[in-house]
Amino acid sequence: MIERRLRSLRDGAGRTAIDVPAGAGKMSAILMGLGWKVLPFDLFPEYFTAPGLTCVKADMEQGLPLPDASADLIVCQEGIEHIPNQLALLREFNRILKPGGKLLITTPNISSLQAKCSNFFMESDVFRRHEPSPLDALWLGDDERFYYGHLFLISAQKLGLLAKINGFRLVGFHRSRISWRSVFLGVLYPLSALLNLYAVAYSGWRNRRLGSSYAWAVGWEMMKTNLNPKVIFQKHMFAEFDKCSTPVEAMRELNQNAREEIGKYLGK
């Protein structure tokens, strides 16, 4: 699913791509074939088999051994759901990326209709098993390398928010594998739309001190994500972000926007 998007980007010649976690190296090989200088990292580099490349052992939770602003692209395929501190991970990605650099993330989709319904009844992301459980917290290796399975699955809303406060702009969600159970549950789409409209209206009223237009704009963006077909009807979430500022700059901007809206409200 990422390969299609990568091929639509301009040629990677002279640019650096980070593949983390690299796994067996399939994505690294694709990137190299598209002309990128590829730096693969993984907690278990012994499983990396892509020819012509060397995978460096690294724990995403501890950061990557790379200088600031050294990469044009980071591909994090099926990795963020294994990391407890996802805020710190996105901050690390921001540190590594050059201004205007691109971040591609895929992860199991707990924002699909199937996952939402399953979680409502069983606190599980799929119908056929219960989670979380000790079965999803695995320890591998002789040097105390910990692998946490899917203990930290992340929703589209949370991913978007954590990325935003770390200086990333959401470009959009892309197509991945269709969840046919979610398509079947599409009969609930009108109800979901009504509930989202109610949530936006209530949020606008509750946060009216921030200014109705500002509160509505925030709620509207959240509603668009909740009802996005590329989110609710797919097995995997595939999100694309651009680095537009540092985390400090992003937080200052968000804080300034809130202060301005509060000032408008108090000035009435």
Image: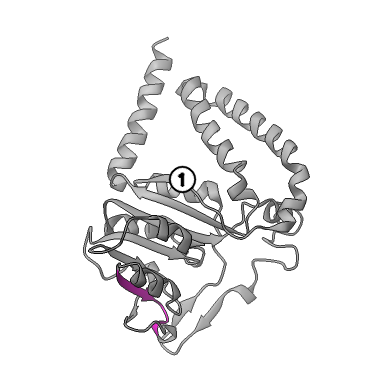
Q: Classify residue 137 as left or right of residue 52.
A: right
Q: Residue 66's x, y, as percent? A: 25, 67
Circle 1 packing at 10 Å, graded few (<14), some (14-19), many (20+), is: some
Q: Determine the residue positioned at 47% across, 65% down.
A: 77
Residue lying at 49% horizontally and 28% vertically, measured from the top left: 217
- Element at label 1: helix
Q: Is residue 39 magenta?
A: yes
Query: Closest to the observer: 55 or 90?
Result: 55
**Left or right: 125 as drawn, with respect to 209:** right
Q: Quadrant of residue 9?
A: bottom left
Whole-percent x and y of residue 37?
27, 69
Q: Quadrant of the C terminus?
A: top left
What segment is highlighted magenta in the picture?
37-45
Residue in front for this viewpoint, 245 or 233:
233
At 32% from the left and 35% from the top, the residue drawn is: 253
Amino acid tagged 1? Leu
Q: Look at the image and name its color scheme.
A: one colour
Residue, far bottom: 142
Q: How many marks?
A: 1
> On screen, 144 above or below 225?
below
The secondary structure making up most of the magenta span is strand
Q: Position of residue 74 (x, y in %)?
A: 36, 61
Decide whether residue 28 is among the magenta residues. Answer: no
Location of mark 1 (residue): 161
